[in-house]
Amino acid sequence: MTTNSVLQAAAPFRWRWAALFVILAAEVMDLMDAVITNIAAPSIRADIGGGESLMQWLGAAYTLAMAIGLITGGRLGDILGRKRMYLIGAAGFTLGSLACALAQEPGQLIAARVFQGLLGSVMLPQGLSIMKEVFDDKEQAKAFGMFGPVMGLSSVGAPVLAGWLVTADLFGTGWRMIFLINLPLGLFALVGGLAFLPAHSATRTVRLDLVGALLAAAGSALIVYPLVQGREHGWPAWAFALMALSVAVFGVFAWFESRRARVGGDPLVEPSLFRKRGFSGGMVLGLIFFSAMTGFWLTFSLYAQIGLHYSPLKAGLAGIPSSLGMVAAFGASQALLKFGRKVMHLGVLVMAAGVAGLILTLHLAGTGVTPWQVAPALLVAGLGMGLVMAPFFGSVLAAVEPHEAGSASGTLTSVQQLGAALGTAILGTVYFQRAKGGDFLWAEQVTLWVEIAMLAVVFVAIFLLPMHPVDEHGQPRSQPQEAEPADQVLA
């Protein structure tokens, strides 16, 4: 056992479990804001105007800005302190939410969503890094395991809450209340962060890689922007040129980071991370899976309101079975850890079965389909989502060493958000392209078939992960951790 391990076991951070709930509060804010506009988009467009692309940009602007800033945000935590950057991010995210609520026209709202995403990218990666810092190997499994139920419950609550707030029109605020609700959550994150997060002292001087940050931002923007805007402009040559340029920019980014590390500099992303099979495979898997999952929710929410004429509240309630399936999967995940990546393979198959069931249900019921009729298929799809997501973060971060934590957390969360932005762009574009003639049922069915094709790619990508996650010493973590007595957990 190393000296560091002995010290950590002898004197664990006193407020580590309280700190976990502060970190989870930030995750809840992000999860809510990533999905609430899916429900509110038609109402927002009816109120302040904008084209069909506005409904895509409401989500894509947030997730793209988040993806652009997350790698840098994680690195800033290493340089300036994780607690400090968490507090700055939480304060900025809360102010961005207020700006969204006060927006009067589409440009203002999209700009506020970008600001929200950028400050969120400063806040979110600090949480994963702090967890790696304050929890030992045994407790990390339980701590990361709490992400599952919180993500599942947030996915249940956020669409329903958004639908209720839009329909209730509290104090005449309409859709604006979906952003105002972040104000008390942001205050909790700030106060809790001040009280319970540990101060972080860097063990070595790290300089921010500004060139790497600019290259990563440019590469992300160059692929998402043409995917969202290209359809409205009839897919001009510049859209494909920008996407090709994005690939080139990411190639330059990879070369620059490797070169910076070789000459003794501080790269934005530690190249050593990509020599870990669990991390590099997880990046590919996360990009494709979160793209498929986010695109699925966006198009279903749009079809429910535009095609089936559900109210925002009814559309939110219709998605509850899927979220309940996710919660059930998260609850069962600890018992399934011993099966390693097979759990994720099972999850993809179950999710694909749910999507296929939804296609069949829509084919049989047509435009008169009710929430009760789609409930079984959505429940199965949500169960599959949960089986993939539950072991994902722990598996990918298991082998990350302490000095890589900031870079790894920022990169992982960035890939998750970039995947969400791509899913919004790709599946949203497929849906609106097929809905041009007003046949929204056909548009949704085609989009769901594309979803199944994406899940087939996810199934193959899972083989990039090791059979069982390994820790930073290369030892397999194939068994779920034993639970500690409650008095030890709360100590």
Image: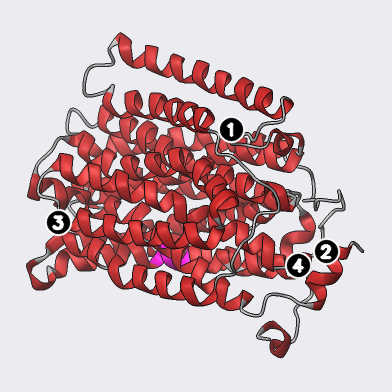
> Three-letter amino acid code at disc 3?
Leu
In magenta stretch: residue 121: no
Residue 446 can be seen, yes or no: no
Above or below, comparing residue 289 to residue 430 in the picture? below
In the picture, measured across the screen, residue 334 lies left or right of residue 59, that is: right
Disc 2 and disc 3 in contact, CB within 8 angstroms: no
For mark 2, what is the residue? 4
Q: Secondary structure at mark 2?
A: helix
In the picture, measured across the screen, residue 237 lies left or right of residue 463, that is: left
Disc 2 and disc 1 in contact, CB within 8 angstroms: no
For mark 1, what is the residue? 457
Query: In this rendering, which labeled residue sits more in front, label 1 or label 3?
Result: 3
The image's mark for residue 102 is 3
Give the residues in magenta: 152-156
Q: Quadrant of residue 447?
A: top left
In magenta stretch: residue 153: yes
Foreground: 200 or 400? Answer: 200
Q: Disc 2 or 1, which lies upstream in sequence? A: 2
Above or below, comparing residue 313 to residue 111 in the picture? below
Identify the image quadrant of the N terminus: bottom right
Disc 2 and disc 4 in contact, CB within 8 angstroms: no
Q: Disc 2 or 3, which lies upstream in sequence? A: 2
- View extreme (front): residue: 205
Q: Quadrant of residue 158?
A: bottom left
Q: Could you tell me residue 11's position as x and y percent?
A: 76, 77
> Three-letter amino acid code at disc 2?
Asn
